[in-house]
Image (cartoon, rainbow, N blue to C red):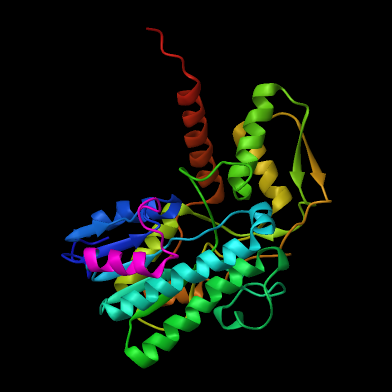
């Protein structure tokens, strides 16, 4: 990103800036030489509480806001926490966007989710199809809450002149991801399962579902670059997909992850668990045409980088220091 940035000298607030995607975005934001980057931590600022968000904005006095904070997880986490995921994501978004209006923020970038798309969206997913049906049931509460924030941004633009943009990234993965099997997404869950099975010399690994559904995956650093490009170059009210425009079945993905990890055993699919949405692949034309975003990292290269990071972390945790 060029040093001649719209963010140079600005006070920038990044909700979720200490998280997975947020950490990479903050790294890239530093290259723009903002006056200050404020990253509120959840232990200090409960963004679901209106007064907490009002105090945050009074203290931070941001010129630009990136709203990345979310309560999110894989299929299992969504099934276990539908009420929490709806409330937390709806409340955080409502509070942050309202305070952007009240404080005259110059620009707010809200990151949505592909879970907002209807279950049977025609492939590739085009932004104009966002409202043509109900999301896939296992993650609908999360998806509907995030989808509603697009409506709020558009309404605030028309009534109050708030410059708010809404981005929809594909499924993210990469170093620093969440590898907790209870709450992680598919790629980190697979990496951990294969790594542990390799260490235990287990003959097979059981994975959820049939493996027949497809997904699109975007390397986290590429996503951060796309968000920053949009903040610099896009000021429209229409949502914009961020992705690679390529899909892979979960079975094909599992074979790729297995090979990168170096696990020699078998994969057993458990169809008693849900697959989720049948297919996901985004139309990425808008992002390319409106602000020049094109993903750079291939799935294989991204998997290698992610596995290497995860294995390095495991080695570091298990290393015993001799006094």
Q: Quadrant of residue 57?
A: bottom left
Q: Is residue 222 left or right of residue 133?
A: left
Look at 75% across and 30% down and name the residue there.
265
- State yes or no: residue 45 in magenta: yes
Q: Position of 161 compared to 287: left or right?
A: left
Tell which residue pokes out farthest to the top in this image. Answer: 323
Residue at the right extreme, as displayed: 272
Residue that protrudes farthest toward the front in the picture: 51
Give how far across and how far down residue 209 sits, in percent.
Answer: 78, 51
Q: Which residues are magenta?
A: 41-59
Residue found at x 31% / y 70%: 54
Any magenta on residue 274?
Answer: no
**Residue 3, percent from left and from top:** 19, 61
Q: Specify the quadrant that holds the N terminus.
A: bottom left
Q: Is residue 253 visible?
A: yes
Task: Find residue 242 and report its horizontal and vertical position in percent.
Answer: 49, 66
**Between 19 and 81, which is closer to the camera in this rendering?**
81
Q: Is residue 149 above or below residue 175?
A: below
Q: Quadrant of the C terminus?
A: top left
Instruction: Report how many numbered discs are placed on residues in the image.
Output: 0
Name the image quarter holding residue 133: bottom right
Q: Residue at x 58, y 77 (%)?
A: 126
């Amino acid at each position: 990103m060029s040093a001649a940035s719209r963010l140079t000298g600005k006070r920038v607030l990044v909700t979720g800036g200490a998280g997975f995607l947020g950490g990479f975005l903050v790294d890239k934001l530093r290259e723009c030489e903002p006056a200050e980057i404020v990253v509120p931590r959840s232990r200090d600022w409960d963004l679901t509480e209106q007064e907490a968000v009002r105090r945050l904005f009074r203290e931070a006095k941001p010129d630009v806001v990136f709203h990345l904070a979310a309560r999110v997880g894989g299929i299992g986490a969504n099934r276990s926490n539908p009420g929490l995921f709806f409330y937390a994501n709806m409340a955080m978004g409502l509070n942050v966007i309202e305070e952007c209006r009240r404080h005259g923020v110059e620009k707010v970038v809200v990151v949505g989710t592909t879970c907002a798309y209807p279950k049977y969206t025609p492939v590739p997913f085009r932004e104009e199809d966002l409202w043509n049906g109900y999301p896939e049931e296992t993650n609908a509460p999360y998806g509907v809450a995030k989808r509603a924030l697009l409506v709020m941004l558009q309404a605030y633009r028309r009534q109050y002149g708030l410059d708010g943009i809404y981005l929809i990234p594909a499924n993210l993965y990469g170093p620093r991801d969440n590898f907790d099997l209870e709450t992680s997404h598919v790629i980190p869950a697979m990496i951990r399962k294969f790594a542990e099975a390799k260490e235990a010399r287990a003959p097979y690994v059981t994975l959820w579902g049939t493996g027949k559904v497809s997904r699109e995956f975007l390397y986290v650093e590429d996503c951060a670059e796309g968000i920053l490009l949009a903040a610099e170059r896009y000021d429209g009210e229409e949502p914009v997909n961020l992705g690679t425009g390529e899909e892979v079945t979960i079975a094909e993905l599992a074979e790729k992850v297995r090979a990168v990890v170096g696990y020699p055993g078998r994969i057993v699919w458990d169809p008693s668990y849900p697959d989720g949405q049948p297919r996901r692949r985004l139309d990425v034309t808008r992002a390319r045409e409106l602000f020049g975003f094109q993903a750079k990292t291939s799935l294989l290269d991204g998997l290698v980088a992610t596995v290497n990071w995860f294995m390095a972390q495991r080695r570091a945790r298990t290393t015993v220091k001799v006094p």
